[in-house]
Image (cartoon, rainbow, N blue to C red):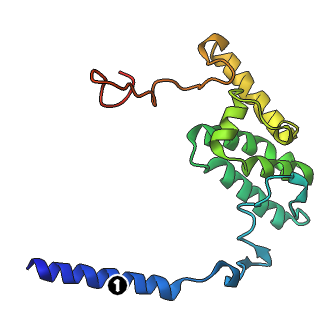
Amino acid sequence: MASRKALINVHRIIRSTAVVRRSSVTPSAAPPIFQNGVDLGARFFSGNTSSPQNIDIDLSSEEKKRITINRLLYRSKQRGFLELDLVLGNWVEENVNSMDETAVKSLIHVLDLENPDLWKWLTSQEQPPEIVSSNPVFLALHKKVMTNLNKHAAPETRAAAGQPWVKGWDDFKRGRDAPISGNQ
């Protein structure tokens, strides 16, 4: 009975790897995804984090503007980092309709930044690089975050600049008397 189950499992593994090999497509050979003349694949990540001005944005028609705004809203609300989802999502929802092409490029540059770095820079845990600190969208977001932090939490309750902001969740005590996990 056990050998029969082993054979079935081996057959499933072989069949699943064969399907993967058959259906895999090399990225260079993959055709771009178009719908109604709009490239649906390239707008989710610009791939350019060095300069926001090198990004190609087309806001010429209402339809293209609506599609771009919807993508920016999605990217700002679905980052997988709850705090940034809330901060960025609300800010973008409030401001994206009044943005011109340059502001949209600056927003895309901010959205291309890594979550942990962006959060540390927005909350002043670390100093952002010059290219980020000169971004007008980042400056507006940073101002909003710091205003809310100062309104709802006293500065002395937060960690000093350059120090970890959240303490306890990743502090593991080592030794014989230490708890198994956590800072207990």
Task: Decide: few, some or many residues near mark 1? Use Cα within 10 Å; few <14, some 14-19, many ≥20.
Answer: few
> Can residue 100 be seen?
no
Instruction: Depth check: give the residue in front, 154 or 163.
Output: 163
Quadrant containing the N terminus is bottom left
Please count the marks in the image: 1
Above or below 48: residue 114: above
Q: Is residue 84 above or below residue 32?
A: above
Residue that extends furthest to the front in the rendered view of this protein:
175
- Which of the 4 image quarters holds residue 37? bottom right
Task: Kindly state the secondary structure of the residue where label 1 is placed.
Answer: helix
Q: Which residue, as the protein is rendered here, is positioned at the far left?
A: 1
User: Which residue position holds label 1?
Assistant: 14
Which of the pair 78/64 is nearer the observer? 78
**Residue at position x 63%, y 40% in the image:** 116
Q: Amino acid at mark 1?
A: Ile
Task: Please name the residue shown 61% across and 17% down the image.
Answer: 158
**Left or right of 180 in this view: 19:** right
Percent coordinates x, y for residue 26 in the rendering: 62, 81
| Residue 58 place in picture, x, y as percent | 88, 65
Looking at the rendering, which quadrant does residue 83 occupy? top right
Name the residue located 46 percent from the left edge and 24 percent from the top edge: 168
Whether residue 22 sits left or right of residue 109 in the image: it is: left
Q: Residue 27: percent from the left, percent from the top?
A: 66, 78
Q: Quadrant of the C terminus?
A: top left
Is any part of residue 75 visible from this angle?
Answer: yes
Q: Is 96 displayed left or right of 169 in the figure? A: right
- Residue 171, percent across and down? 45, 27
On screen, residue 97 above or below 161: below
Q: Is residue 26 above or below residue 100?
A: below
